[in-house]
Every structure is written in C-alpha cells, then in structure tokens.
Amino acid sequence: MPVLARVKPGDVRRRLPDRPPEQPEPFEAILRDMDDVILPGITHWQSPNFYAFFPGNSSPPGILGDLLSSGLGVQGMLWVSSPACTELEAHMLDWLVHLLDLPKRFLSSGPGGGVIQDTASSASLCALLAARERATGFRSNDEGVGATALTAYTSAQAHSSLEKAAGIAGVGRKNLRLIDVDQQFAMRPEALAAAIAADRRAGRIPFFVCASVGTTASTAIDPVPAIAEICRRENVWLHVDAAHAGSAAVCPELRWIHAGVEHADSYCFNPHKWLLTNFDCDCLYVADRAALIGSLGVLPEYLKNRPTASGDVIDYRDWQIPLGRRFRALKLWCVMRHYGAEGLRAHIRGHVKLAQDLAAWMAADRRFHIAAPVPLNLVCFRHAVGDDATQRLLDALNNSGRAYLTHARLDGKLVIRVAIGGTWTERRHVEALWGLIQEMASF
Ligand code: PLP
C-alpha cells in the first residue's frame, strides 16, 4: 500500500450505496468492502514510512485497551456512572506524573490533578476557559465576556488550536497576541513582557499565556522559566502545550524540556502522539482543579447523586467540555504495564537517535540545509536550491508511495518535516528514506 492514499476526492463515496441496506448483511461482505473500498482510501499512519505531521502512535496493548473500553461501553461522566472508570483515570494520570517526573502539584492527592481529554486542542480550550473565569472573578460564564478587554498571548509558532480556543471562548482571535520568536523559533520573553505592558497601558486585561514545548513546525522549545517569571509577576495564567514533545520526558536525559513547568497553571501532552497509546488520549493537568471545575461544572437535577454531594469523588464531566466520556484510561493502563517505563524509554530514545543521525547525514550533504535545531525527533530541512526545488522533492517523495512527509514554513521558507516517531519505524526505514531523499534530490 502507498503510505499516502492515492484516491481523488469523491472516489470512496462513489463506491458506496446511496442508502443503508434493508436486509442484514453478512460481516464477510463488510470486510470485503473494507479491503476493496476503504483501504485504498487510507493514508497509512501506522506505516513505518509515515513521517508526516507528528506521529499518531498505535500499539497492540493500546488497541486491546481500546477494545476493552468499547466492549464494556461504559460512560464515565460521573464517578457513580462507573467508579472504576474515574478511579483508574485519576490513578493513571498520577502514574504519568511519576513516569515523566512532572511537578507534584499535578498529582490528584492535592488541589490539582489530571484528566484525559480527546485532544490537545480541547485541553488548551479548557485551560483558557479556566483562566478566563479566574481573571473575571468567575463571572464571564454567567454574564458573557462582552467588553471585558481580555488579552491572551502565545508565540507566532504556536499551534493554531490556540487561535481557535480564543475564538470559541469569546476572547476574540484578534485579542490573542502572537509573540515574536528568536532564531531558534522559540518565544522571546522580552517581547512577551513588552506586549503585556503595552496592553496594560491600553487598559486591557492580560489573562493567559500559552508556552509551547515542541512547536508543530519545528519542535522549538519556548523558554518556560523566563515566561513563567513574567506570568507570576503579572498574575497571568500559564498553560504549557507539550502535545507532541512531552512524551520525551519518560527519559531522564530529556527532562530538560520541562524546565519551568513547575510554575505552570496547566500543562498538556498527548500520549496518542508519541507514547504508544491509540488516538484519542491527551493528558491535561491543572495546579488548581477548583478553577477548572468552577469554569466547566454544571449540576442539573438528573445528574445529582449522593457521592457527588459528598464531595469525596471526582466527576470528570466537570473537567471537560462534553458530558459523556469513554473509558480511555484502560489503554494507558495496558500500555504502561505492557511496555514498562524501560520499554517506553527505548521507544523514545530510538526515534531521537534516528533523527539525530538523519540530521548529521543531511548536514554532510551540500544539497540540503537543516532549517531548525533538532532537539528531539523532528528534522526540518530544505533543498539548497530554494523553495521550488524543496516542493519538487517533497512531491516526488510522496508520489513514490514509499514515504509520507509534510511541510512547514520557517523564516518564510518552505521546509520538509521528517517526524520520526512511528511505532514500527526502525533504523532500516530511516536509512531507506535517506536513500530515497538523495535519489530524488538529484534532478
Ligand atoms: N499543540 C501542538 C504543539 C501540536 O503539535 C498539535 C498537533 O500536532 C496540537 C497542539 C493539536 O493536537 P490535537 O490534535 O491533539 O488537538
């Protein structure tokens, strides 16, 4: 199968009947169509030759955990609606604090705690909403944000989900300031301080900063300690988005990426990207759960129950946007127990080493420029001849069916991103990719 699907828009739908069947069909017929109709329209995220976007890891224990969740089919909106669903989740999120050596203020035994969200986009939105409520004395949920003049900040390299969140939260996309980055594509703290000061002078209310640990374009790591210092001084909520890179902290030698996170009000990372846990699974941590629950909690009559009234239990519906929720902690439990910390470290270390090696091979070839630092498992490069040559190379690689890579723009120039993080990606695959890149770059 080619890694990138070769179908054209509408090809898959054209092969499906217009209406559902009147009579039951044998499952064999469905599986036949799976092979004939669906698989040609799949871009193979689990191929060892998938280097696009960031990885979306799947693994045998992750699949089995998901299957257990689907089979049980429980709904964990309240503790009482399935106690084990809530308690395993709180426990797994605590395990991850220990596994990644995250700040102890994120443990569920204190005022903070963790919760599984579907994606980092939802996590950042929840953090932004909690920050908005805290900054407005918990009034904006009731009264609307209207003319409150709130302003939020993130770097010009931050993920677009922040822009989306500012819009959804009623803060307004134009009130999200995109702060300048340095030559390594990390946020410039002095530019952040200046933007906050300018907004204060204009009578606005700075309330939220999102720092990125591993930007989408190039895995740039914002200087969180300096950003945290500004947030503390200005009494502004600090959220840290480590969607992809956070998983690297299973390795003690890579924990430097989390410097300063101990001062964050909230933090998220996605085990569904690089920690062998099937999509969807984002872990959001808060230092003060009361701010989150105070922003997202509602209690209609039909959800009232004794354990909730006792205050002794977590009801995760108050920690997320939807009411209902799947038993996603099962896949984390299966993954952590199956691989153990050592297995997870080997997974991360293998990819980081491969990315460093690929970057070194490229640096020694004058046809290519490495376009950004390679702190972890993403190599951004361009063809020395320029954007057109880079685009031709990218198209040739993807059209070959032997790999799938995506692009970004850094310093206004096109770059090809090689994100090495697939569950099944080994040295031989990266060596083959390097051979392919060299072959296709010689036009
Ligand atoms: N933040 C960063 C840094 C990302 O790289 C991504 C996606 O790649 C996201 C957020 C959004 O992730 P999700 O799909 O979980 O919303």
Image: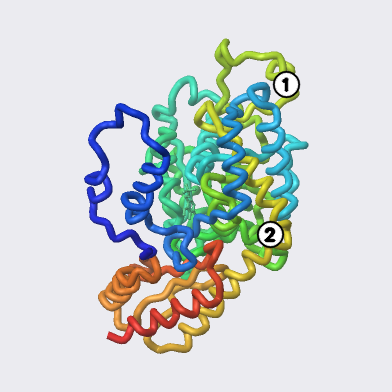
Residue displayed at 33% across by 59% down: 5
Disc number lying in front (1 or 2)? 2
**SS of the residue at dot 1?**
loop
In the rendered image, residue 7, in percent from the top left (x then y), is placed at 27, 57
147 lies above or below 11: above
In the rendered image, residue 385, in percent from the top left (x then y), is placed at 30, 83
Identity, as a three-letter code, of the amino acid under mark 1: Gly
Q: Earlier in the sequence, mark 1 or mark 2?
A: 2
Q: Is residue 338 visible?
A: yes
285 lies above or below 428: above
In the rendered image, residue 209, in percent from the top left (x then y), is placed at 53, 47
Q: Is residue 413 visible?
A: no
Residue, far top:
301
Q: Is mark 2 within 8 Å of ligand 1?
A: no
Identity, as a three-letter code, of the amino acid under mark 2: Val
**SS of the residue at dot 2?**
helix
Nearest the eye: 149 or 389: 389
Nearest the eye: 377 or 267: 377
In the rendered image, residue 180, in percent from the top left (x then y), is placed at 44, 60
Nearest the eye: 434 or 216: 434
| Whole-number angstrom distance, CA of label 1 to CA of label 2 | 33 Å
Q: Residues within 10 Å of mark 1 (few under 14, many from 20)?
A: few
Where on the picture, by quarter, is residue 134? top right
Residue, disc 2 = 250
Nearest the eye: 440 or 263: 440
